[in-house]
Image (cartoon, rainbow, N blue to C red):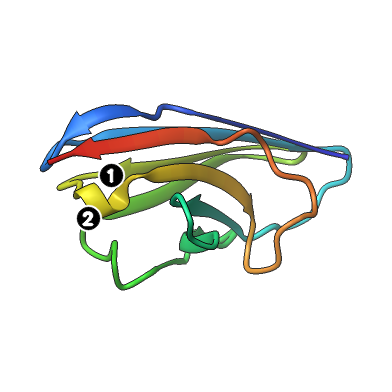
Amino acid sequence: QVQLMESGGGLVQTGGSLRLSCVVSRSTFSSWTLGWYRQAPGKQRELVAGITSRGITNYADSVKGRFTISRNGAQNTIYLQMQMNSLKPEDTAVYYCNKSPEPWSYWGRGTQVTVSS
């Protein structure tokens, strides 16, 4: 069973910054690739950033150069972060962490990010 707990969202103005955090806990150990996903109102959930257990990262074109994903921890608990800079109104969404690119069926509650223009 996996536990996912996201935090760090909030309301910011265009150009502002936020840092998201996630605690990923699972009873069995594996070298997971993890990612941050987001879902805006009326849109499908999308993967915006991913990071392997070795620290190799990848980003969606829409966030490249503005978002930075990182991770630490090991074994059964991983701490995932994402620094979001130069935020835009189109970044407004609920952000989730999960395994990437094939997420677990379980999702956490997410954290709301709202960017005002």
Say if mark 2 contacts mark 1, CB within 8 Å.
Answer: yes
- Horizontally, residue 65 falls left or right of residue 68, namely left
Residue 106 coordinates in the image, percent (x, y): 78, 46
Up the image or down, 102 lies above or below 69; here it is below
Q: Residues within 10 Å of mark 1 (few under 14, many from 20)?
A: some
How many numbered marks appear? 2
| SS at badge 2 | loop
- The residue positioned farthest toward the bottom in the image shown: 61
Up the image or down, 34 lies above or below 92; here it is below
Residue located at (48% from left, 56% from top): 42
Residue located at (41% from left, 45% from top): 93
Residue located at (29% from left, 67% from top): 62
- Three-letter code for the amino acid on which mark 2 is drawn: Arg
Of the numbered discs 2 and 1, the one sitting upstream in the chain is 2
Which image quadrant: the N terminus? top right
Q: Residues within 10 Å of mark 2 (few under 14, many from 20)?
A: some
- Three-letter code for the amino acid on which mark 1 is drawn: Met
Residue 74 coordinates in the image, percent (x, y): 67, 41
- Compute the Cα span from label 2 to label 1: 6 Å
In-front residue for pair 50/38: 38
Quarter occupied by residue 35: bottom right
- Horizontally, residue 77 falls left or right of residue 68, namely right
- Horizontally, residue 42 falls left or right of residue 28, namely left
| SS at badge 1 | strand
Residue 84 tag number? 1
Residue 12 coordinates in the image, percent (x, y): 21, 30
In-front residue for pair 39/49: 39
Residue 15 coordinates in the image, percent (x, y): 10, 42
Which image quadrant: the C terminus? top left
- Horizontally, residue 72 falls left or right of residue 13, namely right
Q: Determine which residue is flagged by label 2.
A: 66
